[in-house]
Amino acid sequence: MKQIITHFTDDDLYKFTMCCAVIDNFPRAQVKYSFTDRNNTIYPEGFSDELNKQIEMLESLVITDQEIEFMKSRCYYIPGWFYNYLKGYRFDHKWVKAWQDESGHLHVELQGSCRYNFA
């Protein structure tokens, strides 16, 4: 299967700024996020299995110096320490659980601490 997300910055600014805010204000916090499908979509059987494979592939992503420079040029309000944090950050697929219920609805939960799993 081809990896869909191939760059660390294939994300939205909201997630980066919220991560920065949580670490800065609540460095020991345990966080939990849940996916909400507002359309109540019925996904095909096996969709969550394929999604879990894509989630595992996220472990290979690291932020590049070029991506950091791009972010610094556009997001001047993000403190410098956060870019150092991102350079050391490594995703762990064990933080994420994706599954489908009997009806085919997708459920995704992410839980963990912002302060671990550094290279």
Image: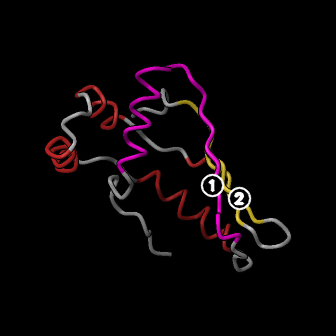
Task: Calculate the distance from the C-alpha at mark 1 to the C-alpha at mark 2.
Answer: 6 Å
- Say left or right for 104 vs 1: right
Q: Quadrant of the C terminus?
A: top left
Residue 103: mark in rendering = none
Relative placement, left or right, of 110 versus 21 is right
Residue visible at 22% across and 42% down?
75
Residue 35: image tag:
1
Q: Nearer the viewer, residue 47 or 41?
A: 41
Between 76 and 57, the one nearer to me in the picture: 76
From the top left corner, tell me how far across and down residue 112 is, in percent. Answer: 60, 34
Q: Are marks 1 and 2 in contact (CB under 8 Å)?
A: yes
Label 1 crowd bin: few (<14), some (14–19), many (20+), radius 10 Å: few
Is residue 42 placed above or below 88 in the rendered structure?
Answer: below
Q: Amino acid at mark 2?
A: His
| Residue in view at x 54 percent, y 19 percent | 28
Give the color scheme: rainbow, by chain, secondary structure or one colour: secondary structure
Task: Specify the segment rendered in magenta.
Answer: 13-40
Q: Which residue is mark 2?
A: 107
Element at badge 1?
loop
Question: Toward which corner of the image does residue 53 lie, by quadrant?
Answer: bottom right
Please report the residue visible at 86 percent of the width from the left and 70 percent of the height from the top: 102
Is residue 47 toward the left or the right of residue 102 in the image? Answer: left
